[in-house]
């Protein structure tokens, strides 16, 4: 028996498609159906490595987790990772096909349809329900020809469509009406329900508008989803996380918002810790004096290092390092920036190639290569780690995605070009496949590694927070100075909920919200209409 299908499309990017797909995946799973997500083409810098070492969009991995299944490359056969305004790294079936200008990709799109069909057919063989996700809006009339991700994909799959509009941005009725009117008649016929997302206020006030849009379009509104804070992995740089302002807390952690920031889901776990205020900053004037600066992953390390230098971040970071009050951690591309030199002899980072001086905070050099390392990894932390004091010898797990190799050198190169003997530095992670990863300066204040998901190792994160907290409040609840009470208290309690438990609770919370907001009887009726 063929799988049932339903597709979620939106009036615009960031309308809530990814989260609605995740919600339906969890709901159908709760209702006893083997369910999988699918997005034929995803454009995002947040990615994930499957168990067999293939790269897909992070959103599809999140949706698979909501469905309680392992992520597969068939759930996202095409991933585009922008490298500039005019081109992307194109990843087909989890492997790099090359860096393609936008026009080249659009010319080749139709040739990718057989690959998309193969992936979708494999999912149909394994699952009872497939929840598809579109991209952007189906009303981008300049992209209609050879569409493979919105109505073109719905037709290939024989899937009815729910169209989602974001009311929080305003103009939701106009965007729903305009989107439907710009579609061809046969495309309009596929839209079987409208969903209004991110609603705030009294639903009674909305009712006249709901009635009018149903009358004008002849399509029922199947639900209004209230605005509610659900903490799940975001898809791309439209993330609301970057805009949030947070109250002051014991620890202040700053993540640099690089122009090509990728895999910023690495830091979601820090954001929910009660001791931590996590900020994404792109301007140095807002830096202040944080306890920890994190240089995140990036899709273009050398371009973002040049931006970091031109925007004043380099001098700010080096000043912080010299003052010895702030710890610094680099992940993946951020790790590469911490070293002495970045070398690109084959033009992997861009046609110019060449060599670029790094920040010189670790005695390391990175040489880029055309081969991308993609793997799930596990290992142990060095016994004598000071950055994560107390967790030495503990186990670690995560994944690697990078195109370059970083190695220790004997000297560091300062910004003015003078070479100096390096501070003593050690490799800090021994991987179970025999490799070593990561470097830590002997004073424990600068650390870098390729391990995405580092902070998802709960006990390690506990130790990092304890070390930073003790440094700030040496006598928890005591006095910082004679006669002056500390404004902060810190207790050494292991965080009560693991990362996995927290995510599971968020998926269930999302499912409850959507189940209570949509007409689920109507959703199952629409699902039954899907074509074989």
Image (cartoon, rainbow, N blue to C red):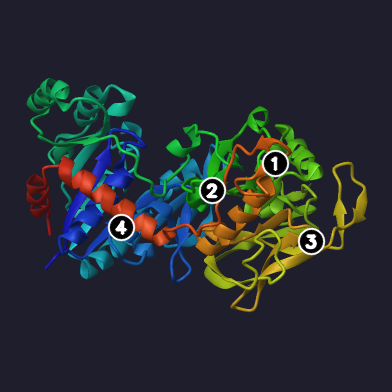
- Between the C-alphas of marks 3 and 1, the distance is 27 Å
Earlier along the polypeptide chain: callout 2 or callout 4?
Answer: 4
Determine whether, in the image, residue 188 is placed left or right of residue 109: left
Earlier along the polypeptide chain: callout 3 or callout 2?
Answer: 2
Reading the image, the residue beneath label 1 is 480
Reading the image, the residue beneath label 2 is 262
Earlier along the polypeptide chain: callout 3 or callout 1?
Answer: 3
- Between the C-alphas of marks 3 and 4, the distance is 41 Å
504 shown above or below 17: below
Q: Which mark is residue 66?
A: 4
Determine whether, in the image, residue 386 is placed left or right of residue 211: right
Determine whether, in the image, residue 511 is placed left or right of residue 97: left
Q: Residue at x 61, y 34 (%)?
A: 282
Q: Residue at x 38, y 63 (%)?
A: 73
Residue 200 in percent (x, y) is at 26, 28
Q: Which mark is residue 493?
A: none
Q: Residue at x 31, y 48 (%)?
A: 148
Q: Nearer the viewer, mark 1 or mark 4?
A: 1
Q: Nearer the viewer, mark 3 or mark 2?
A: 3
- Between the C-alphas of marks 2 and 1, the distance is 39 Å
Characterize the local packing of mark 4: few (<14), some (14-19) or many (20 or more) Cα atoms within 10 angstroms. Answer: many
178 shown above or below 313: above
Q: Are marks 2 and 4 in contact (CB under 8 Å)?
A: no
| Nearest the eye: 507 or 486 | 486
Give the secondary structure at mark 3.
Answer: loop
Is residue 76 at least partly visible in the picture? no
Q: Are marks 2 and 1 in contact (CB under 8 Å)?
A: no
| Nearest the eye: 339 or 56 | 339
Q: Quadrant of the N terminus?
A: bottom left
Residue extending farthest front = 483
Q: Residue at x 22, y 58 (%)?
A: 130
Earlier along the polypeptide chain: callout 1 or callout 4?
Answer: 4
């Amino acid at each position: 028996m063929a799988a049932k299908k339903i597709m979620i499309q939106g009036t615009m990017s960031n309308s809530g498609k990814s989260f609605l797909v995740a919600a339906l995946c969890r709901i159908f799973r709760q209702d006893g159906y083997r369910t999988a997500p699918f997005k034929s083409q995803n454009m995002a810098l947040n990615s994930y490595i499957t168990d067999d070492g293939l790269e897909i969009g992070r959103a599809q991995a999140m949706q698979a987790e909501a469905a309680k299944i392992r992520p597969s490359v068939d759930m996202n056969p095409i991933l585009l990772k922008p490298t500039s305004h005019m081109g992307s790294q194109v990843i087909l079936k989890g492997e790099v096909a090359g860096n393609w200008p936008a026009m080249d990709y659009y010319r080749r799109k139709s040739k990718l349809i057989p690959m998309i069909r193969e992936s979708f057919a494999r999912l149909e063989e394994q699952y009872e329900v497939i929840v598809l996700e579109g991209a952007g809006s189906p009303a981008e009339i300049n992209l209609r020809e050879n569409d493979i991700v919105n109505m073109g994909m719905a037709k290939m799959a024989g899937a009815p469509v729910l169209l989602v509009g974001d009311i929080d941005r305003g103009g939701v009725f106009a965007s729903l009406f305009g989107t439907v009117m710009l579609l061809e008649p046969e495309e309009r016929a596929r839209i079987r329900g409208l969903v209004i997302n991110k609603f705030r206020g009294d639903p009674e006030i909305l009712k006249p508008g709901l009635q009018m849009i149903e009358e004008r379009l002849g399509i029922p509104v199947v639900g209004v989803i209230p605005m509610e804070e659900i903490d799940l992995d975001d898809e791309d740089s439209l993330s609301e996380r970057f805009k949030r302002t947070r109250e002051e807390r014991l620890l202040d952690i700053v993540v640099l918002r690089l122009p090509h920031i990728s895999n910023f889901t690495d830091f979601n776990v820090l954001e929910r810790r009660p001791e931590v205020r996590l900020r994404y900053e792109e301007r140095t004037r807002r830096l202040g004096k944080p306890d920890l600066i994190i240089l995140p992953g990036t899709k273009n390390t050398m371009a973002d290092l040049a931006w970091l230098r031109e925007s004043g971040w380099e001098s700010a970071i080096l000043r912080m390092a010299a003052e010895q009050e702030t710890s610094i951690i680099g992940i993946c591309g951020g790790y590469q920036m911490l070293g002495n030199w970045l070398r690109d002899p084959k033009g992997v980072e861009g046609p110019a190639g060449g060599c670029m001086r790094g920040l010189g905070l670790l005695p390391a050099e990175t040489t880029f290569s055309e081969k991308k390392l993609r793997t799930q990894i596990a290992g142990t932390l060095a016994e004598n780690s000071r950055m994560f004091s107390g967790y030495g010898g503990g186990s670690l797990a995560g994944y690697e995605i990078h195109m370059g190799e970083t190695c220790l050198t004997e000297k560091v190169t300062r910004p003015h070009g003078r070479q100096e003997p390096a501070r003593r530095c050690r490799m800090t992670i021994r991987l179970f496949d025999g490799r070593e990863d990561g470097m830590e300066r002997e004073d424990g204040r600068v650390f870098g590694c390729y391990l995405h998901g580092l902070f998802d190792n709960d006990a390690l994160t506990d130790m990092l927070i304890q070390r930073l907290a003790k440094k700030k409040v040496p006598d928890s609840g005591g006095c910082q100075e004679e006669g002056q009470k500390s404004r902060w208290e810190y207790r050494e309690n292991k965080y009560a909920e693991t990362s996995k438990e927290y995510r599971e609770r968020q998926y269930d919370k999302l499912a409850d919200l959507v189940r209570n907001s949509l007409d689920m009887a109507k959703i199952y009726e629409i699902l039954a209409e899907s074509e074989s």
